[in-house]
Amino acid sequence: MVTITDVAKLAGVSPVTVSRVVNDSDYVSKATREKVEHAIEELGYVPHFMARGLRLNRTFTLALVLPDITNVFWTTVARGAEDAAMKNNFSILFYNVDEDVKKQDRVVDIVLSQQVDGVMIAPHDSDIKHLAKLQHNRVPTVILDRILDESQLEHKFDFVRGDSISGAYQLTRHLVRLGHKRIAMVSGNLHASTARDRVLGYRMALQDQAIPFDEDLIVYGEFKASAGAAMTHQLLDRGLTFTSIFAANNMIGMGVVRELLRRNIRIPEDMSIVFYDDYATDSDYFPFFTVITQQAYEIGYAAAEMLFSRMVNLDMPSRTQILPSTLIVRYSCGAQIKDGKSPLSLPVLAPSEFHQTTSRVKPIEDFSSDAGESSAKESNQ
Amino acid sequence: MVTITDVAKLAGVSPVTVSRVVNDSDYVSKATREKVEHAIEELGYVPHFMARGLRLNRTFTLALVLPDITNVFWTTVARGAEDAAMKNNFSILFYNVDEDVKKQDRVVDIVLSQQVDGVMIAPHDSDIKHLAKLQHNRVPTVILDRILDESQLEHKFDFVRGDSISGAYQLTRHLVRLGHKRIAMVSGNLHASTARDRVLGYRMALQDQAIPFDEDLIVYGEFKASAGAAMTHQLLDRGLTFTSIFAANNMIGMGVVRELLRRNIRIPEDMSIVFYDDYATDSDYFPFFTVITQQAYEIGYAAAEMLFSRMVNLDMPSRTQILPSTLIVRYSCGAQIKDGKSPLSLPVLAPSEFHQTTSRVKPIEDFSSDAGESSAKESNQ
DNA sequence: TTGTATGCGTTATCAC
DNA sequence: GTGATAACGCATACAA
C-alpha cells in the first residue's frame, strides 16, 4: 500500500507537508503543492481513513441499525440517510436486527467498536440498558421511528419519527367516513411504540366518531407478512362481523391480503383494507391500496443531519423531529364502489387454483447461459 | 474512551495480557483471565476496531456498492450480503451510485480510503479503469449482477450474478406459448450487461420459436419507473401492433403499468405484461405480475462468501457463480383469460379520474400528535 | 505465563 | 512555508 511517506519521498518533501496538501490545511506554497499533487497522482495514493481516524478520533462513518432493510419503508429511510451522509462525505454502516434484542445488543457492541461518529437506530423497546451504552460512550445517537421510555436514562436521545397516532387517526377516520363501523385492526408487536401509537390513534378516531371500541377486533403480532396472514386467520376465525381491516404496517398488510385471497374474500367488495406505510417504493406507479405514507426518505435524511449537528455540539438539548404522514386514497376501500367506479378487484380463486396459478416453472436446462465467458463456473449456492 | 491500558491498570496486568484475553490468543492463566474479564466488564471496554485494524491491516468491513437500495432486488441482495457478513463478524458499508459513473468513481476512492477487506459492486460498464484501482490495491472484489469486459485488465474479477439470458429466454418463451407473436420490450440502459443479455435472451427465444424479430418493438432507457413510463409512451406512439410487453426490470415494469393505466389499456385484457425481477419482497403475498425472479438473497450471500474465501487466498483463479432464475406465472398475461378464469384486472380510469382517486389528503391539523412528550419539536425537513 | 519494545499511517504541536 | 517529534490504541516479536 502506498502511504503518505511514499508520496513525501517522491515529492521530495516531508510527510507533514503531504498531509497539509491532502487536507487543504495551513499554508503550502503553490510550487510544493503541485509537486505533491503530482506525486499523489503518480502513485495513486489514497488517504488511510483508519490511521487518520485513530489520530483524529473520528471515522467519518455513521451506523444505521434497522429492523430489516427488506421492508421498503426502511429501504427508503436508508436511502435518505445515505444521501445525507454522502453529502457530508460520510459513509454508512448498516445492520439488520430483525426486532431481535439479542442481535441488537450485539450490533450495539460492534457499532461501539467501530467507533462510528453517530448512530441511527430503530430500537427494540426492551433494550434501554444496552442503548445507554451509546450514551455512556458519548456517541451521538438518533432514535428512528419510535419512542422510548427514557425515565431510566441519564441523558435524553434525539428522535426522528413519523406521527403514528395522527396517521392511524386519519386512516381510521377515512374508513369511518366511508361508512365503516366495524373496523378490525391487525396490529404489530407492542414492544414497538409505533404499534401502540397506531392502536391509540385508531381508538381515538373511533371515539371521536362515537363508534364503540371492540377489543376482540384487534390482533397482535410481528411486523411481518407471515404474521399478518396468521393474525388475519386468527381474526377471521373469531366469527365476528367487520367490514374493513387496518393493517399496522405494509408487511402485515401483505399478509392480510394473502389470507383474504386464500379465503375467497374479495377486496374491496367483501372487505376494505388500509395499510400503515406504503408497500412499494413508487407505489403510485401501481396504485391499489389506500395507505398512510410516511416521509421515509426525509426521516432518514433528517436523522443523519441531526447527527451532524449533534457532533458539533454534544451538549445541546435533545431534540425530537416529527414528520407528518399523508393519506393516499386508492382502491382498497369501499368508497369507489358506491360511486360506481371500476375498482381494482383482487382475483377470487379457490385455494387449489391459487397455488396452481402462481406456479414456479423450472429454469430451462437445454440452454447454455454463459455466452462468451471462459472463466471457471460454479453452480453451488 | 476506555482503552486496553485502562483495563490493564484496573486488572493489575499489562496491556498485552488484556489483548491476549480479548483475542483468545496465547496462553493466559485462568486467574488473570478472570481478573481481566472482570475489569473489562466493569469499565465497559470495547476494542477499538480502527486501532486494531491499523495494526492488523484489516477492517472487518465489506463495501456494498449498489445502483439504488430502493429497488427490492438490491434490497434483498443487501440483506443476503449482510447476513453472510454478520455471520463472519464483518460489517457492511453501503453506497448508492445510481448508475452514475461519477458517483461510482468517487465511491471507489472512498472505499479504498476506508481500507475495506472486500468490495461487492454492481458496476457501471464504462468505468473499467477506475475499477482497476481496486485490483491495483489488491482489494478482493466481487462484481455483482453484471458482466464486464475484462480485456483491458491485468487481473480478472470474481463474479456472482443471475442468468439474464436464460431468464429472458424463459420469459419470452412463456409469452410465445400463450400465443403472443408481437412482444414489445422495454429495455434498460445498454451500459449494463443485464440489459444487453435480456435483449439477447428475448431474441433467442423469438428465433427458436420462429417469430420474426422487429427492432422497432424495443425501446431503451434507464432502469427506473419514470423511464419505464416514458419509454412505454414512446413505444405506444409508434403506432405498432403488439399484444404484450417485456419489462427489463421491476422498476421499468412499474412505469409500464403506469403508462398503460394512464391510457386506459387494461392488463391483461388489452395487454399482457411480464417483468424481469420481482417487484416486492414477498410478492407471493400480493400476487399479480408474471415475473422472472432471481435468487437475490443468495446472490448477496454468495458474493460475501466469495470475498471471504478470496481473502484467504488472494491468488486463486477468478471465479464466476451464476444463479438460476425462476419463472413465476401469475395473472398479468393472457393465459388466464383463455381459461375463463377471473384474472386480476387493473382499473380502467380516465386520466382525470386517476389523479382524482389517488389524491393525497392533507394531514389533520386539529390534532396534537405529541402525546406525552415535552421535548423540543421541530418541523423543518 | 507475562511483560517490554516497536510500529501500523496519520496529524497536532511546536520549532525553525 | 516547512520539518521533526510524538501520540492515537492495539498486537506482534522477542525477552524474561
Image (cartoon, coloured by chain):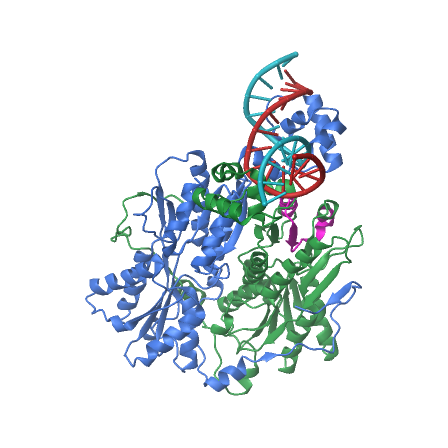
Chain colours: A blue, B green, C cyan, D red
Label the magenta part by its dominant secondary structure.
helix
Is residue A56 visible in the rendered structure shown here? yes
Is residue A343 visible in the rendered structure shown here? no
* Residue drawn at 34 percent across, 79 percent down: A236
Toward the viewer: A18 or A155?
A155
Q: Is residue A239 above or below residue A313?
A: below
Q: Is residue A361 above or below residue B22?
A: below
Q: Find the magenta span and give its range.
A: B104-132
Toward the viewer: B16 or A133?
B16
Residue situated furthest left in the rendering: A210
Residue A52 lies in the magenta-colored region: no
Q: Is residue B128 left or right of residue B338?
A: right
**Residue B253: image location, x then y, percent:** 56, 66
Among the 4 quarters of the image, the one containing residue B68: bottom right
Q: Is residue B207 above or below residue B197?
A: below
Among the 4 quarters of the image, the one containing residue B322: bottom right
Residue B106 lies in the magenta-colored region: yes
* Residue drawn at 75 percent across, 66 percent down: A377
**Residue B24: image location, x then y, percent:** 58, 50
Q: Is residue A172 left or right of residue A127?
A: left
Toward the viewer: A215 or B7?
B7
| Count of all numbered marks drawn on residues in the image | 0
Q: Is residue B198 left or right of residue B265?
A: right
Toward the viewer: B308 or B164?
B308
**Residue B257: image location, x then y, percent:** 53, 68
Quarter of the figure that contains the C terminus of chain B: top left
**Residue A221: image location, x then y, percent:** 37, 68
